[in-house]
Amino acid sequence: MFISITDQCYRTVDLPQRPLRIVSLVPSQTELLVELGLEEHLVGITRFCEYQLG
């Protein structure tokens, strides 16, 4: 099953499956991901994030 994602510039990317790993480049989004219970999927964050991978 393929997943088709279109970004804000109307570029479409087809993925073979749902992404399992997340790299967060925005500290506020990292906090949101942790609050949503997705911290186990985080594999990369910026040095400005208060949350630490562990």
Image: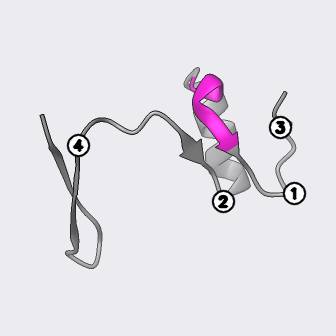
The residue beneath circle 2 is 25
* Disc with the residue nearer the chain's start (2 vs 4): 4
- Any mark on residue 51, and which? 3
- SS under mark 2: loop
* Disc with the residue nearer the chain's start (4 vs 3): 4
Write the start and end of the magenta stretch as one range: 38-43
Q: Position of residue 24 (x, y in %)?
A: 63, 51
Nearer the camera: disc 2 or disc 4 = 4
Q: Amino acid at mark 4?
A: Pro
Q: CA distance from mark 4 to mark 3?
A: 30 Å
Q: Position of residue 31 (x, y in %)?
A: 69, 39
The quadrant where residue 48 appears? bottom right
The quadrant where residue 43 appears? top right
The quadrant where residue 35 appears? top right
Q: Amino acid at mark 3?
A: Tyr
Up the image or down, 50 lies above or below 6; here it is: above
The crowd level at tag 2 (other Cα within 10 Å; few <14, some 14-19, many 20+) is some
Residue occupying the point 82% across, 50% down:
49
The residue beneath circle 4 is 16
**Quadrant for the N terminus in the image:** top left
Q: Position of residue 2 (x, y in %)?
A: 14, 42
Foreground pick, 54 / 32 = 54
Residue occupying the point 58% across, 20% down:
37
Q: CA distance from mark 1 to mark 4?
A: 31 Å
Q: Amino acid at mark 2?
A: Leu
Up the image or down, 19 lies above or below 49; here it is: above
The crowd level at tag 3 (other Cα within 10 Å; few <14, some 14-19, many 20+) is some
* Disc with the residue nearer the chain's start (1 vs 4): 4
- SS under mark 1: loop
* Disc with the residue nearer the chain's start (2 vs 3): 2
The residue beneath circle 1 is 47
